[in-house]
Image (tube, rainbow, N blue to C red):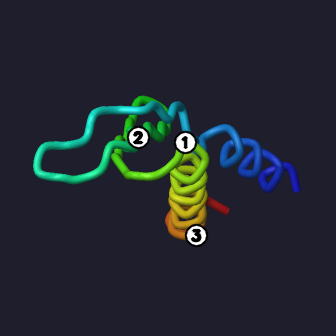
Amino acid sequence: MIENSEETTVSVKNQYKVESVVKTDTPEGMTGDDWHCYTIVYGKTNIQGMKPGTLFSVTQHAEEFAENLNERSNRYGSQAHSSRKKK
């Protein structure tokens, strides 16, 4: 049971999370004037994206994106980790 607790602690600590969402200039070649840049972090890794929309809608998108990354990471990471576990 202790192993499961440690794994849970590690997976909660090491998650993708939205660091910031800020209004930005419209990217070259794109239309509209309501663009935002978001940054998702995981340790030293930064993922940046740009999306048109309100601050609320882009923040919601970024949070869903981070949540999906965490689900994928937990699904594949835990399987890879468990196959390397020594018994």
Of residues 37 and 73, which is closer to you in this image?
A: 37
N-terminal-most mark, 3 or 2: 2
N-terminal-most mark, 1 or 2: 2
**What residue appears at the point 50 percent right and 35 percent down from the top-left corner?**
21
**Circle 3 SS class:** helix
Q: Residues within 10 Å of mark 3 (few under 14, many from 20)?
A: few
Q: Is residue 15 above or below residue 45?
A: below
Which residue carries the number 3 mark?
75
Q: Residue 52 in the image: state x and y as whole percent.
A: 38, 52
Residue type marked 3: Arg
N-terminal-most mark, 3 or 1: 1
Q: Residues within 10 Å of mark 2 (few under 14, many from 20)?
A: many
Q: Quadrant of the C terminus?
A: bottom right
Is residue 30 left or right of 66 when viewed as pictured? left
Q: CA distance from mark 1 to mark 2?
A: 7 Å
Q: Residue 77 in the image: state x and y as whole percent.
A: 52, 61
Q: Is residue 81 visible?
A: no
- Labels 1 and 2 touching (C-beta < 8 A): yes
Is residue 10 left or right of 29 when viewed as pictured? right
Residue type marked 2: His
Of residues 4 and 33, which is closer to you in this image?
A: 33
Residue type marked 1: Leu
Which residue carries the number 1 mark?
55
**What residue appears at the point 38 percent right and 38 percent down from the top-left corner?**
37
